[in-house]
Amino acid sequence: MLYSEKVMEHFNNPRNVGVIENADGMGEVGNPVCGDIMKITFKVDADEKLEDVKFQTLGCGAAIATSSIVTEMAKGMTLEEAAAITKQQVADELGGLPPAKMHCSVLATDGLKVAVDDYLTKARSRADIGRDQVCRPELRPHSDEDHAAEHEEACDI
Ligand code: FES
C-alpha cells in the first residue's frame, strides 16, 4: 500500500498532539470494527472560530495522519465550517489516500463533528435556549452503523 509523502510526513510528525485543558469542545469517537479511537479538543475565540485544536489518536497510520491534518484544517474555521469538513477534503489535503484507507479519515471528521456538537450543547446549557436552535442535525456525525459499513474493507495496518 502506497501512502503519499504528506501522509507519511504527518504520520511521522503529527501536528497538534495532546489535549486542551478546559476545552470548549471535546469529541471522542471509536470504530467498533477496527478498534481505533480518536479524541479531539478545541478552543474558540471571541468570534467562535476554532483557535486551537488538539488530538490524540490510537489507530492506524492513516487515522493518525488524517487526525493531524484535520487539526490544521480546522484552525481558523467557524463551527459550521469545521463540522462540514468531509473525508474527501481530508484525503485531498493529504495528497490522496489509498482506497482501502479512505474510511480511516472518517474518524477525524467524526471526532470534530462530535466536538462541535459538544460545544453547541454546552452553549445551549449556558444560554438556556431551545435545543432546536443550537443542536443542528446537520452538524451531527453519521451513525456507527454507517462507519461500520465503511470498515468492511480490509485494513492492513
Ligand atoms: S481507522 Fe480503522 S483501520 Fe484506520
Image (cartoon, grey):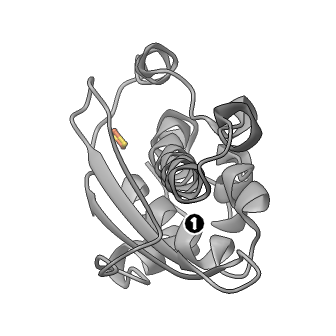
**Can residue 17 be seen in the rendering of this structure?**
yes
Give the residue at x 28% y 38%: 156
Q: Is residue 77 left or right of residue 42?
A: right
Question: Viewer-proximal residue, 70 or 11?
Answer: 70
Q: Amino acid at mark 1?
A: Val
Image quadrant where residue 78 sits: bottom right
Report the residue that reaches farthest toward the front: 128
* Residue assigned mark 1: 70
Name above or below for residue 120 compared with residue 137: below
Q: Secondary structure at mark 1?
A: helix
Question: Viewer-proximal residue, 57 or 82?
Answer: 82
Residue 153: % across, % down = 43, 22
Residue 67: % across, % down = 46, 63
Crowding near the residue tagged with mark 1, few <14, some 14–19, many ≥20 C-alpha atoms within 10 Å: many
Residue 54: % across, % down = 41, 76
Question: Viewer-proximal residue, 145 or 34?
Answer: 145
Give the residue at x 51% y 36%: 103
Quadrant containing ligand 1 reads top left
Image quadrant where residue 133 sits: top right
Question: Viewer-proximal residue, 1 or 104?
Answer: 104
